[in-house]
Image (cartoon, rainbow, N blue to C red):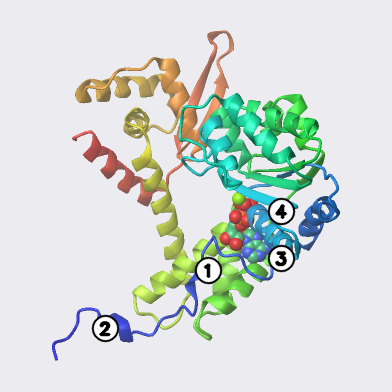
Amino acid sequence: MEKNIFSEYLNKPSLFKNKDVLSVSFIPEKIPHRDNEIKQIVNVLSPVLKGHATSNIFIYGKTGTGKTICMKFVLDELKKIIQDDNKIKSIYINCKMKKVADTEYRLLAYLLRSFGENVPDTGLPTDVLYRKFFKLLDNEKQNIIIVLDEIDALVKKIGDEFLYNLTRVDSELKKGKLTIVGISNDLSFTDNIDSRVKSSLGEEELIFPPYNALELRDILLERSKEGFVEGCIDESVINKCSALAAQEHGDARRALDLLRVAGEIAERTNSKKITEKHVDLAEEKIDLDRVTEIVKNQPRQSQAVLFSIIKTNNEKIMTGDVFDNYREICKNNGLKILTQRRVSDLIAELDMLGIVTTKVISKGRYGRTREISLAIENKVLDRVKKILKENFGE
Ligand SMILES: Nc1ncnc2c1ncn2[C@@H]1O[C@H](COP(=O)(O)OP(=O)(O)O)[C@@H](O)[C@H]1O
Ligand SMILES: [Mg+2]
């Protein structure tokens, strides 16, 4: 029989027992080190079981501190215990999801559809949608819980008026009761929203602290028991992933990514065990993928700005220096030359993405300028340069 090109892979022993368990979207049965947080959410929401009103909750904490997983876990548990589906409904929305929360219309349409309403993709005035929504909520005695995850992204896209309207809807309901749970990665999120929204959303506030290395270790141990074949991973590897992620900001997502990618690299290189060396390689790969992904997805103007920063490449790069290179790149590529002000905005965006870091420096009576430095590691930088060179035909 002729050898199949896949047969080698079919017979190759895998290091993974169940890779899904190591993916970011998996919800494990046990969630170590979040008992308190879960209990607090449950305490606030539990009156719905008796048909009573609850407070709105505002949850915040840095990325990877377990906000999403805890909230989903609580909603799952709630669903299991509810006897009458019509009396308590919960809707989870990740506001970063494209086509769901990028306009007020889409968001309302999404909410209405999750109640089984037919809503056209466009065309109706939003106040018609609000009225429909209000009627739906109020047509019987029921509790509705709406979870708006990554609510900071929502407000960035469509402002806070939607939240204001939602909290107002709640105060006008006669039969139905609405609870809003807002989750934000951005700790300063409430600084810039309408104070009425702020006080209404923040009736109960809950902060998720970063995990320390020991806590991350427990989380990874639990997941790796299910995820990997026994004996192919040492504790030193788990310790290393935890330590690296703890240095960052106690990000469990980072820790899990390191572990899973280390496993993938070990497997691909036919290693029988996952070692600390694989974790180092995983760290490099994750950074490379993250940065190149961001760079590739930037609009052309931002790419041009980044390219001009890279070309300027001094110890200390000032906004003014960048502009000369930027102008040159635009001319060569038929791009419109934006004002220095806009370029400055684009640089600030690159800062938010973690591609560059900037520091505003006061120059006394000469005003202020931004000092820019690249936040990309050398190895990754080579790859970024290559992408940009290709894009700008150099
Ligand atoms: N206490 C925990 N136990 C198990 N896994 C966790 C825990 N906290 C976070 N994780 C995992 O880490 C990743 C990031 O958690 P997530 O809830 O998405 O963080 P956040 O929403 O705060 O950014 C997810 O894959 C999640 O499964
Ligand atoms: Mg989250």
Image quarter (top left, top right, bottom left or bottom right) of the C terminus: top left
Q: CB under 8 Å between callouts 1 and 2?
A: no
Q: Say what amino acid the circle numbered 3 marks.
A: Lys
User: Which residue appears at 44% of the width and 53% of the height?
Assistant: 287
Q: Which mark is residue 331?
A: none
- How far is disc 1 from disc 2 in space, using C-alphas? 25 Å
- How far is disc 4 from disc 3 in space, using C-alphas? 14 Å
Label 2 belongs to which residue? 8
- Give the left or right position of residue 213, taking residue 46 as reference: left
Q: Say what amino acid the circle numbered 4 marks.
A: Asn
- How far is disc 3 from disc 1 in space, using C-alphas? 24 Å
Q: Quadrant of residue 50?
A: bottom right
Q: Nearer the viewer, residue 314 or 185?
A: 185
Q: Which mark is residue 80?
A: 3
Q: Say what amino acid the circle numbered 1 marks.
A: Leu
Q: Position of residue 199 (x, y in %)?
A: 80, 31
* Quarter of the render that holds ligand 1: bottom right
Of all residues shown, which one is farthest toward the left? 2
Label 1 belongs to which residue? 22
Going from N to C along the chain, the mark reached first, 3 or 2, is 2
Between circles 3 and 2, the one closer to the viewer is 3
